[in-house]
Image (tube, rainbow, N blue to C red):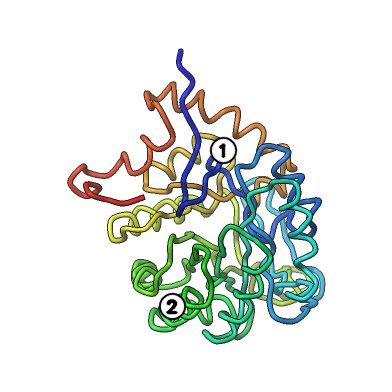
Amino acid sequence: MTVAAVEVELAGIRLRNPFLLASGIWGESGESLKGAFDAGAGGVITKSIGAEPRDGYPNPTIEAYDTWGMLNAMGLPNPGIEEYPREIAVALSAGVPTIGSVFAGDADSFADVAKRMAATGVLALELNLSCPHAKGLGSEVGSDPAEVERVVRAVVCAVSVPVIAKITPNTADPVALGLAAERGGAAAISAINTLRALAIDLTLRRPVLAHGLGGLSGAAIKPVGVAIVWQLYEALRIPIVGVGGIRTADDAIEYALAGARAVEVGTAVAFGGIGVFGRLASELPLRLDALGFSSWAAAVGAAHPRSASAGRTA
């Protein structure tokens, strides 16, 4: 048996495997980013960082549902762009392929934070245009294609590293958002972020989370993520990173067949610990072999009609 190759090239970035640590999970410090890579991740994405420190919402901020999902409303807590670069330096000094995640409320602010994040030496930037529960941020900015295009273009003009736009599923037309990001110069699209959701305590007769509305992640949203990746692959020419509900190598391959060139893993880490990356990395080549693929790249888009995927770029 020949073990299938799992190396990935994403917007010019070389990764040893397609599994990226998702933003918002395990990325509080440079040591935790390094820990994810040491455990087997192909690369890591930092916490979403803004211009100023942000405390986030009061507790409770998380409600877990066995292993099928997690509801959260953290409120984008972060130390701000002045403080966080020292954590990135720890990861970069250890040779960890690191992508910096940033958020802001408008195009100019995104460009400013992005320039400062790019100056840390990260390999690429992921723009958080999709958090479903932060007022004036995330999906409130990223639900309008025109604004997505403005934000992406402003950031692309401000930095020299690849820009990845993370789009929201909480919209009638995610493809329009992807096309807007592509027009703005994005090197890739991440899809998806969490689904807007709510849980209510029957006894207290109020929302379970202090903020009320939150975002649902985990296995429950995988079909939504796969569907949106499928739609984006049919319409876009830039690479797609699949996000949402990846717990096994088969989950990752399903995203690849839909068109994802890489995938992000988050909630599975929250439930199973950082060792999930080692398990996924070891399972993936065996499952690709069993399914008849010589490499991860050979699986990307393979479920689409050949006429639809012909002529695509990396």
Q: Which residue is mark 1?
A: 16
Of label 1 and label 2, which has the lower sequence position? 1
User: Residue shown at 72%/45% (left/top)?
Assistant: 36
For numbered disc 2, what is the local secondary structure? helix
Q: Which mark is residue 37?
A: none
Are dots 1 and 2 in contact, CB under 8 Å? no
- Which class describes the residues within 10 Å of circle 1: few (<14), some (14-19), or many (20+)? some
**Vertical placement of 139 versus 175: above or below?**
below
User: Residue shown at 59%/41% (left/top)?
Assistant: 247
**Vertical placement of 230 versus 101: above or below?**
above
Residue 25 x, y percent position in the rendering? 70, 56
Q: Is residue 75 left or right of residue 242?
A: right
Residue 291 x, y percent position in the rendering? 40, 25
User: Residue shown at 57%/70% (left/top)?
Assistant: 128
Residue 235 x, y percent position in the rendering? 28, 60
Q: Which residue is mark 2?
A: 153
Give the camera-side residue of 41 and 77. 41
